Image (tube, rainbow, N blue to C red):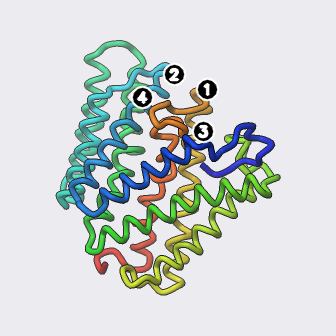
Amino acid sequence: MISAPASATGAAPLSPRRVVVGVLLAVVGIGSVYWPLSWLAITLAVAAFSLWEFAQLAEKKGAVLEFSVLLVASTLYLGLTYLGRIREFEGTLLSVTVVGALLSATIRGKGKYFARSGYTVLGVMYIGKLLSYWVAIRMMPNGAALVIDAIVIVAMTDIAAMLVGITVGRTPLTPISPKKTVEGALGGLLIATGASIAAGMLPQLGFPWWEGALIGLVTSFAAQCGDLVESALKRDAHVKDAGSLVSGHGGFLDRFDSFIFGGIAFYFALWLVHAVGSH
């Protein structure tokens, strides 16, 4: 969540419930990082609940998605990534996903075939495919440290942007989400980049300062874009939150929207600094 000036939010953003739930999510998430299988399980759970909420948003637009296709295809993206076979089978998986979505929409015979099949494929790419990069990062050598680094960057983006926006935010960032501010977005970007530089210098990572800065900038910027994209989806569906499953935070998409884009951006940043395959 990027941020909003205090006068715009109305309610206190750091309610005790929000803080407690946020801390519990962080403990569970970071704790699961140390075992690849538990990290896969956590990522699968986030994907499944996020897919359900995505399907609910699409239904508000009049398209009942093919949820079985959504879930199976996304699970295969994550599972094949965990097994190190996604590059080998991704082309086939994408083709089967498209065919499955079209056939399922046709066989169910409830009309709106374009919307139902198209939104289904979009959901697989948006949530299943993009979340698979978190699994890919974990499966790299030194993957646990890299995942924690990525989590810190995205979390610092959210927290710093919110606090800066509440304190000095005055300039609206975009009509898509009127409460977000330019000051908050820049604050989140700069503070998260600083955190990335500091984390990168730890022995577990060993990034030069400029590599840490590049990784932080790319990941933080993408995380904020992920927040805006999810805001646009909610605005299009005329809802405030994607769901209510995460107490004090809305739904899973509301809580993990920044992470969906942040994972692929972090992976891409590692590739830019030639860290993919070397850490």
Question: Do residues under tags 2 and 1 come within 8 Å of each other at their CB atoms?
Answer: yes
In whole angstroms, how far apart are the C-alphas of marks 1 and 3? 10 Å
Secondary element under disc 2, as helix, strand or loop, is: helix
In whole angstroms, how far apart are the C-alphas of marks 2 and 1? 8 Å
User: Which of disc 2 and disc 4 is earlier in sequence?
Assistant: 4
Secondary element under disc 1, as helix, strand or loop, is: loop
Secondary element under disc 3, as helix, strand or loop, is: helix
Q: What residue is pinned by disc 1? A: 238
In whole angstroms, how far apart are the C-alphas of marks 4 and 3? 15 Å
Quarter of the view holding residue 103:
top left
Question: Do residues under tags 4 and 3 come within 8 Å of each other at their CB atoms?
Answer: no
Q: Residue at x 31, y 34 (%)?
A: 70
Image position of 41 (left or right of 167)? left
Q: What residue is pinned by disc 2? A: 60
Q: What residue is pinned by disc 3? A: 232
Q: What residue is pinned by disc 4? A: 55
In whole angstroms, how far apart are the C-alphas of marks 3 and 2? 14 Å
User: Which of disc 3 and disc 1 is earlier in sequence?
Assistant: 3
Question: Do residues under tags 3 and 2 come within 8 Å of each other at their CB atoms?
Answer: no
Taking depth in this image into account, of 23 and 166 the one nearest to the observer is 23
